[in-house]
Image (spheres, rainbow, N blue to C red):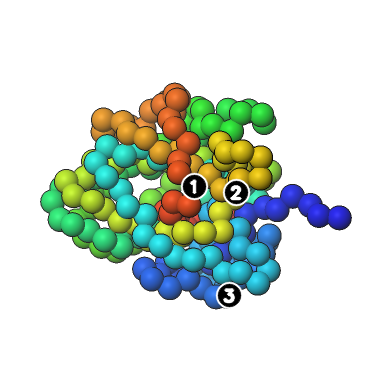
Amino acid sequence: MGGIKYPTMIDAINLPATAVPGNYLADAFHQISGTARFYYVGIVPGPQVAPTSGAHSINDDALFAFPWLCRRTGVIDRVLFNVSGFGGGAATIQFALYANTSATNLYPAARNTDLGEKSIAGTGVVTYTPSISVTAGTVYWWAYNADVGSTLSLFGFSSSFLCLLGNDGAFGSPGDSFDYAGTRVYAAGMPDPFTASVAMGAAGGNIPALAIRYSS
């Protein structure tokens, strides 16, 4: 009898720009031996299917959110993302974690933690050092707002995501919409609550790869 599938967390010690670690387990935490203890959030590869990497493009004033079904109660003390493409000019991005609206309304609601702004001066891994308490079995939303002079790209994934949202299509259509994507004139501080009525993202788009570390 089949069960609900949950997101796999994939070790992201090196947070690669082009390659995806091939050492993973479906529906479970997996950590390569070491002390970094980083995992990607929101990835759902099957037992024989590795996630596919793909750039996530960010335009000016972009507002974007994607869901994360937390697998473990604890405190997150690191959040990383990887700038894989930088066109130059001034660029700022800010991330936040949001609570879900309800068990029957999958939309980001109250802001849990505002991670703050990061100025981007080139490619490479960017690190937050928050203290975020999370609870297993809870749906959260990772979101960002960006102020960029030219298109910015983050290392991301083009498949294998937790498709909570389904698709506004006829019965039998692929249910692979998994984000909300819109615009918000950039201002310091992520909105609280999350901006209302942001459109569901197009099916098949790439999701930014965030890596987290638990301190406890």
The residue mark sitting in front, 3 or 1, is 1
On the picture, is 15 further left or further right than 94? right
Q: Amino acid at mark 3?
A: Asn
Please give the residue where the numbered disc 1 appears in the rendered image: 203
Determine whether 195 is above or below 182 in the image: above
Which of these two is toward me, 80 or 207? 207
Residue contact at pointers 1 and 2, CB within 8 angstroms: yes
Which of these two is toward me, 102 or 179? 179
* Badge 1 element: loop
Name which residue lies at 45% across and 41% down: 201
The 10 Å Cα crowd at callout 1, few under 14, some 14 to 19, many 20 or more, is: some
Determine whether 173 is above or below 24 in the image: above
Please give the residue where the numbered disc 3 appears in the rendered image: 23
Please give the residue where the numbered disc 2 appears in the rendered image: 174
State the quadrant of the N terminus: bottom right
Q: Earlier in the sequence, mark 2 or mark 3?
A: 3
Q: Amino acid at mark 2?
A: Pro
Name which residue lies at 66% across and 29% down: 104
